[in-house]
C-alpha cells in the first residue's frame, strides 16, 4: 500500500494553491505600489508577447492556460490601456494577431524587476536545494497527470 494516503490539510494542490495565490497577491501589490495599473492576468499576456510578439489570440490562450472568453476579455482590456493592438493575419484572415504597442515596451523591464523582487520576497529563507526539490516534485506531478498513458 502507498504511503501517500490523503490526510486532511496535506493535499498538495491546496498548499500549492495557497502559495500561488500569496505570490500573485504580492506581485499585484508590488505593481500597484510602483504605479502600474495592470493586473497579474494582463501581465501574463504581456509576458508572452514580450517573449514573442504577434501571437494569435488562440496561442495566447494556450500559453496562459485561459479559455477563449477569458483571453478575449484580457486582450480587450489591454487594448483599452493602449498596450496591445489586434492585427489581421496576412496569411489567414480568420486569425487576429495580438501585437505590442510602443507603450507596452517600457513596462517590460519594470515588471520583470518587480517579478524578481516578488520572487526574492517569497523565497526568503528557502535554500536553493529546497527550491530545486519543490520544482522537481511539481514537474513530476505535472508529468504524471499529463502523460499520454494516463486515461
Image (cartoon, rainbow, N blue to C red):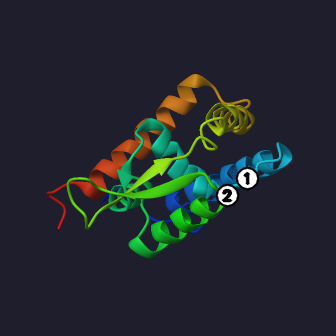
Residue 104 position by quadrant: top right
In contact (CB < 8 Å): disc 1 and disc 2: yes
Q: Which residue is mark 1?
A: 28
Q: From the viewer's perspective, is 15 left or right of 139?
A: right
Looking at the image, residue 122 lies above or below residue 81: above
Residue 108 appears at what percent x and percent y? 61, 36
Tell me if residue 15 can be seen.
no
Callout 1 environment at 10 Å: few (<14), some (14 to 19), or many (20+)? many
Q: Compared with residue 32, is residue 96 higher up or lower down, i.e. above or below?
A: below
Other residues around mark 2 within 10 Å, as few (<14) / some (14–19) / many (≥20): some
Name the spot of residue 112 as percent of width and height, x first: 63, 34
Where does the image place residue 131, in percent across and percent down from the top left?
Answer: 55, 32
Query: What residue is shown at x 49% (from left), y 38% (from top)?
Result: 50
Q: Which mark lies nearer to you, 1 or 2?
A: 2
Q: CA distance from mark 1 to mark 2?
A: 7 Å
Q: Outermost residue toward the top?
A: 128
Q: Is residue 110 left or right of residue 34?
A: left
From the viewer's side, name the closer residue of 147 and 78: 78
Q: Residue furthest left?
A: 149
Q: Nearer the viewer, residue 51 or 143?
A: 51
Q: Which numbered circle lies on residue 39?
A: 2
- Where the N terminus falls, by quadrant? bottom left
Amino acid at each position: 500500500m502507498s504511503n501517500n494516503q490523503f490526510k486532511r490539510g496535506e493535499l498538495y494542490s491546496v498548499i500549492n494553491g495557497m502559495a500561488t495565490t500569496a505570490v500573485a497577491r504580492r506581485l499585484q501589490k508590488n505593481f500597484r505600489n510602483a504605479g502600474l495599473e495592470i493586473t497579474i492576468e494582463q501581465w501574463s499576456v504581456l509576458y508572452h508577447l514580450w517573449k514573442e510578439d504577434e501571437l494569435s489570440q488562440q496561442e495566447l490562450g494556450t500559453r496562459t492556460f485561459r479559455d477563449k472568453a477569458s483571453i478575449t476579455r484580457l486582450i480587450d482590456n489591454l487594448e483599452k490601456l493602449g498596450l496591445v493592438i489586434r492585427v489581421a493575419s496576412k496569411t489567414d484572415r480568420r486569425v487576429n494577431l495580438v501585437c505590442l504597442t510602443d507603450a507596452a515596451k517600457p513596462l517590460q523591464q519594470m515588471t520583470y524587476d518587480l517579478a524578481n523582487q516578488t520572487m526574492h520576497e517569497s523565497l526568503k529563507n528557502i535554500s536553493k536545494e529546497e527550491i530545486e526539490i519543490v520544482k522537481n516534485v511539481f514537474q513530476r506531478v505535472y508529468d504524471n497527470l499529463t502523460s499520454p498513458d494516463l486515461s
